[in-house]
Image (cartoon, rainbow, N blue to C red):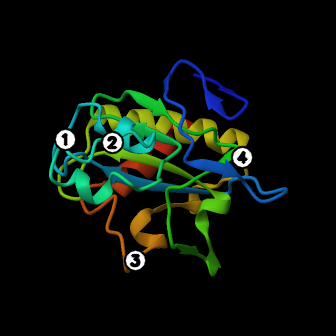
Amino acid sequence: MKLQDGWLTDVRQVPSSHCNARPDNEAPSLLVIHNISLPPGEFGGPWIDRLFTGTLPADAHPYFAEIAALRVAAHCLIRRDGEIVQYVSFDQRAWHAGVSQFEGRENCNDFSIGIELEGTDSDPYTEAQYRALQRVTQLLLQHYPLTPSRITGHSDIAPQRKTDPGPAFDWDYYKQLLTQQQS
């Protein structure tokens, strides 16, 4: 896997229009980890792709009526089996963080990359997901002004609104994987 014009090579690409240009001279310097499952608590299926591309049918599930009109997308999704799907170039501003703040700076979408893990706050993430997240993170650390200290959860930048990636996400294990890879 490599990075070319903000896109990962050798991953499934499902381009989303739920993005726009970053502010002038703004490179991503924050990585935000999220989780998502659609319908809530269910894994697999086409629904995350459909949400992030604005084609989620409101009548396909009762929950979808609440979210079908949202214009949101993360840069990437990592499915339970470790498959990586990219929706937005890392060079673009994906609409993933919403109202947010990091180290006193608001509008985290301006300067962040959002990666969704297919999961819930309470279901353990898979080894395949941690390994895929490690690979993507290492690549991002090489190409953007990111550091391990600037990797955070959605819950940390929007604590009144969000809880993801939740207590099931093993931050210590993820950071250990990053350290092992770097040494």
- Image spot of residue 50 (x, y percent): 36, 37
Q: Which kind of residue does numbered mark 1 sit on?
A: Ala
Q: Which residue is mark 1?
A: 60
Q: Which kind of residue does numbered mark 3 sit on?
A: Pro
- Residue at 59% over, 21% down: 9
Farthest residue in the front direction? 59
Compute the Cα span from label 4 to label 1. 39 Å
Q: Quick check: marks 4 and 3 in contact, CB under 8 Å?
A: no
Rate crowding at label 2 as few (under 14), some (14 to 19) or many (20 or more) other CA atoms within 10 Å: many
Compute the Cα span from label 4 to label 2. 32 Å
Q: Which kind of residue does numbered mark 4 sit on?
A: Tyr
Foreground tag (3 vs 2):
2
Compute the Cα span from label 1 to label 3. 30 Å
**Which numbered disc flags the more N-terminal residue, 4 or 2?**
2
Q: Which residue is mark 4?
A: 144
Foreground tag (4 vs 3):
3
Compute the Cα span from label 2 to label 1. 8 Å
Rate crowding at label 1 as few (under 14), some (14 to 19) or many (20 or more) other CA atoms within 10 Å: few
Foreground tag (4 vs 2):
2
Compute the Cα span from label 4 to label 3. 26 Å
Foreground tag (1 vs 3):
1
Q: Which residue is mark 2?
A: 56
- Image spot of residue 99 (x, y percent): 51, 73
Compute the Cα span from label 3 to label 2. 27 Å
Circle 3 SS class: loop
Residue 134 against residue 84 in the figure, above or below? below
Q: Is residue 183 visible?
A: no
Residue 101 against residue 61 in the figure, above or below? below
Q: Quick check: marks 2 and 1 in contact, CB under 8 Å?
A: yes
- Image spot of residue 82 (x, y percent): 35, 29
Q: Which residue is mark 3?
A: 159
Farthest residue in the right direction? 25
